[in-house]
Image (tube, rainbow, N blue to C red):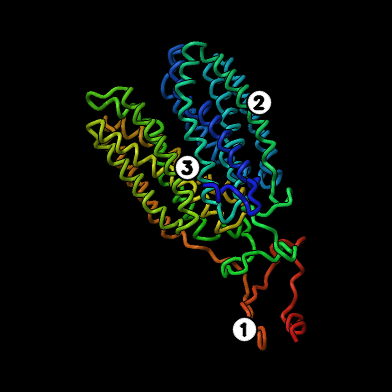
Amino acid sequence: MLPALFGSDRKIFYGWYIVAGGIVINMLSGGLVMHSFNFYVAELKSEFMWSATLFGVAFMITRIESGVLGPIQGWLIDRFGPQTMMRFGLLSTFIGLLAFSQLNSQATFIGFYFVVAIGASVGGFMTVSVAVVTWFERKRSRALGFMSTGFALGGFMTPLVSWLIEDFGWRNTAIASAIILFVVGQILATLFVRRPQDRGLMKDGEPPPVDGSASRVLQQGNEFRHRDFTVREAMRTKAFWGLALAHGAPLLVVSGVFVHFASLVIEIEGLTVVHASLAYTAMNVAQLIGQVGMGYMGDRFSKRALLIPAMFGHAGAAVMLAFAGSFEVVMLAAIINGLAWGSRAPLITGLRADYFGASNFGKIMGWSSIVMSTFMTIGGFLSGVLFDATGSYTVPFVVLGVGALSGVLWVGMSGRPRLPGVRVIGASGPLSRAQPIAMFRPNRPAANPSARSATQRSGIER
């Protein structure tokens, strides 16, 4: 553990402070907003007698919003930096929660919840992920794995939120949540320095090159890439779409569990909401284990190979839930789904950064979110429609499981992409014994020496 957290001078690498800040921000956002949504729904249904359809529509709108705004959000993160976008997102969440506490109609509920969802998205997972990817490369998977634990840890805050709602009312709880998230978030946002170079550091806390020319340490042994992909170049590769589909397919099961898990468990004879909460807690614990464990393994072994068991895990858990008839089966399915859930996110996010680089990662991830949000929306909506049509959760969860299993195919088509337009030249004489030189565009025009022609290089050697 300690070698991973310390740099060569035995001081804690600043990037780990960013990871820690991301954990807390994701935990507060997940615990006070996302995981707590069901408790607010119960209170609103009781007070206003609104239909369940209204809340389903609100959830679907927020998923669509996440997909549509993904590319814009990614561009803004790359343009203005994670810290600026995080402060804006936290402010939006703060305003949305304060307004939410004063709602009195269905229209205001949807409008205010929409503002909260935008803030949680802009100030949450994607923004933190871009920051972590920028600060880490060799230890990227474990850093993303640690950062991802925040959302799972937020699930353990739901008992506190439910107690506050019961004793102090949902309006006061929303106000308190807004204040806590805004104050703590704004303080932690100061940690999110844009690049390691802004603090005189290198990625992963590595020492600077001896000759001081950091620009020469640019993936010298990588035959696939000598600079980062642009967004257009990335979207023209099979790897981009394969990773987006592989990220999205398991979200069919995640959204189905998120919306219908408690209802599914209660329908099993002899089981109650207490059993559902115990199984859901076990799933959160398994998710934490998957995030941390697979974060380490992703830096040591092939991320693509490790993704295959995660896809089978989501599919198997869905089928088990479809035919579950006892608490033991429900608990086992919850644990398997939690392990798969926790393993998948840091692996795919790390693999996307390994393939395309960190320079345009926000925009690339933003465009990927359109595909991911589509699956998330379809999963929750389709499972509800199939349940209404069949009167059982068997068919819905079998369908979701088959959809998640397709992720194996998408991982298979996600081989490492080759940067388009790279021309590799050979040479005679001393250069013939050297590693081939890629001559295309400099990785950083402002930092790299300008590209020289083959004739100039040969003249220098002679």
- Please give left or right for residue 63 compared with residue 7 in the image: left
Tell me whether the residue at label 1 lies in contact with that at label 3, contact meaning CB atoms closer than 8 angstroms.
Answer: no
Instruction: Specify few, some or many for label 1: CA neighbours under 10 Å numbering under 14, 14-19, or 20 or more.
Output: few
Q: Residue at x 32, y 47 (%)?
A: 402
Q: Earlier in the sequence, mark 1 or mark 3?
A: 3
Tell me whether the residue at label 2 lies in contact with that at label 3, contact meaning CB atoms closer than 8 angstroms.
Answer: no
Give 200 or 50, whichever is nearer the viewer: 200
Q: Residue at x 36, y 51 (%)?
A: 309
Q: Earlier in the sequence, mark 1 or mark 2?
A: 2
Tag shown at residue 154: none
Q: Is residue 360 visible?
A: no
Tag shown at residue 183: 2
- Please give left or right for residue 31 compared with residue 424 in the image: left
Q: Amino acid at mark 2?
A: Val
Residue 390 drawn at (x, y percent): 26, 33
Query: Which circle, 2 or 3, is nearer the viewer?
Result: 2
- Between the C-alphas of marks 1 and 3, the distance is 51 Å
Q: Is residue 307 above or below residue 122?
A: below
Residue bearing the label numbered 1: 433
Q: Quadrant of the C terminus?
A: bottom right
For the view shown, which residue lies furthest in the bottom direction?
A: 429
Callout 2: helix, strand or loop? Answer: helix
